[in-house]
Amino acid sequence: MNVFHVIICFLLTTTVSVAQSTDKVKSKNEVKIKSIYFGGGSYYIDGEQELTLYEWLDEFENIHQYQIRIESHTDNIGSKSYNQYLSEMRSEAARILLSKYHTELVNVSVGDFGEDVPDFDNQQWQGKLRNRRVDIILRKLEF
């Protein structure tokens, strides 16, 4: 990854992740989202993003009371099959980070969307950058 990609990833992480990690409420279930961004063609999660993920998880008391969903996305550069593979590798990298955090992996589900469900416009460069991500979604379990 060159310096340009690192700077772009840093800028997106500091600006976009703040917007995406805001509180959302869907019916009775409280939903929280934290995004991890990647360089093009990469599934590497740098130490800074790892640290911010762990700090974010630390904010939740009783993390074992949350269902965790990993949803990975890519831009539309490259073949559809490669982007699906890349999406799966990004999810696996996030799953490994969660296991290092001692998260109970029984409450983790994964959705690998590749290029199929972009949240941002893949015809625009900034949209491509924002689609290169994994969303960690927490939903409080109801007992």
Image: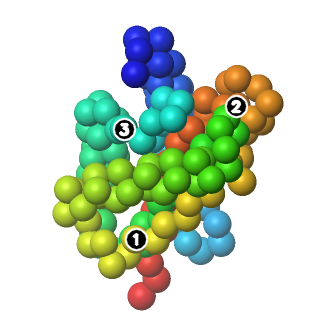
* Inter-mark Cα distance, 3 to 2: 20 Å
Residue nearest the viewer, comparing 114 with 78: 78
Query: Which residue is drawn at the image coordinates 68% and 50% (left, top)?
Result: 80
Earlier in the chain: of badge 3 and badge 1, it is 3
The image quadrant where one finds the C terminus is: bottom left
Query: Which residue is drawn at the image coordinates 48% and 29% (left, top)?
Result: 39
Figure check: 19 above or below 98: above
**Of discs 3 and 2, which sits in the foreground?**
3
x and y percentages locating residue 73 in the rendered image: 59, 48
x and y percentages locating residue 19 in the rendered image: 57, 36
**Which residue lies under the disc numbered 3?**
44
Residue 7 visible: no
Three-letter code for the amino acid on which mark 1 is drawn: Val
Three-letter code for the amino acid on which mark 2 is drawn: Gly
Mark 3 lies on a secondary structure that is: loop
Figure check: 117 above or below 49: below
The image quadrant where one finds the N terminus is: top left
The scheme the figure's colours follow is rainbow
* Inter-mark Cα distance, 3 to 1: 20 Å
Residue nearest the viewer, comparing 75 with 136: 75
Mark 1 lies on a secondary structure that is: strand
Query: Which residue is drawn at the image coordinates 55% and 64% (left, top)?
Result: 111
Number of residues whose C-alpha sits closer than 10 Å to that of mark 3, classed few (under 14), some (14–19) or many (20 or more): some
**Which residue lies under the disc numbered 1?**
108
